[in-house]
Amino acid sequence: MNTYDKLIQSAVVLFNENSYEKTSMNDIAKHAGISKGILYHYFTSKDELYLHCAKLCIDAFGEYILQNSDYATLTDFVDNIIRWDFFVQYPQHKGMYINILTRQPTHLVDELYEIQQQFKQRNFEFIKNLAMQDNISLGKNVTQQDVEAFIVLMHSITPNEISHFRGSLDISEITAYKQQFSRLLKIFINGLQADLD
């Protein structure tokens, strides 16, 4: 592993475990076994390094979704929710992802928002296409805008559910959440097919 990869790996580990505020550039340099001078050669500030790691985390999540996107319909996606599976396979990203969503450094809010928006747009289009393929027969007075609003709501629920897993990843607990979340989404999908007054 080269020097750059070592420092990135160390930064991800420490930001994941300790958050932005509790991690210093000195901590990262020590963890990576390099000098602070070398660290600053690659990144001029902790902010720059944190944003780089945040983008790596978000991009890895997005790529995982695309690589596991062999779902014929939205229902298939609901039945095979992959978001928790990502954090089981890549636990080094869990804490950082939660921090990006719920405990952002206040002075980096705009930059992190932009990173999240890029991810959300790609994910939104993926879910929207599945919804279109599902051939849901919409109820009376239920519009396409209602479907899109449902997708936005579904997209926003997942981060809140993920935030429950701040400690160790307990497989039985995650399985229970997946089943609960799947059931809730099926209720929402069925609701789209009901008539509105």
Image (spheres, rainbow, N blue to C red):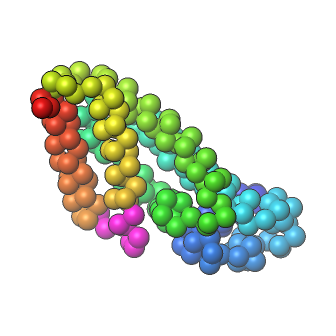
- Which residue is pictured at 20% across the width and 41% down the height? 188
- Which residue is pictured at 40% across the width and 37% down the height? 68
Q: Quadrant of residue 1?
A: bottom right
- Which residue is pictured at 61% across the width and 67% down the height? 105
The majority secondary structure of the magenta stretch comes to loop
Q: Quadrant of residue 138?
A: top left
The answer, for residue 63, to whether it is visible in the render is: yes
Q: In this rendering, would 7 be left or right of 167?
A: right
Q: Position of residue 141 (x, y in %)?
A: 19, 25
Q: Position of residue 84 (x, y in %)?
A: 36, 54
Q: Position of residue 54 (x, y in %)?
A: 61, 56
Q: Position of residue 162 (x, y in %)?
A: 38, 59
Viewer-proximal residue among 102 and 5: 102
Whether 111 is among the magenta residues is no
Q: Quadrant of residue 16?
A: bottom right
In magenta, the rendered stretch is 163-171
Badge count: 0
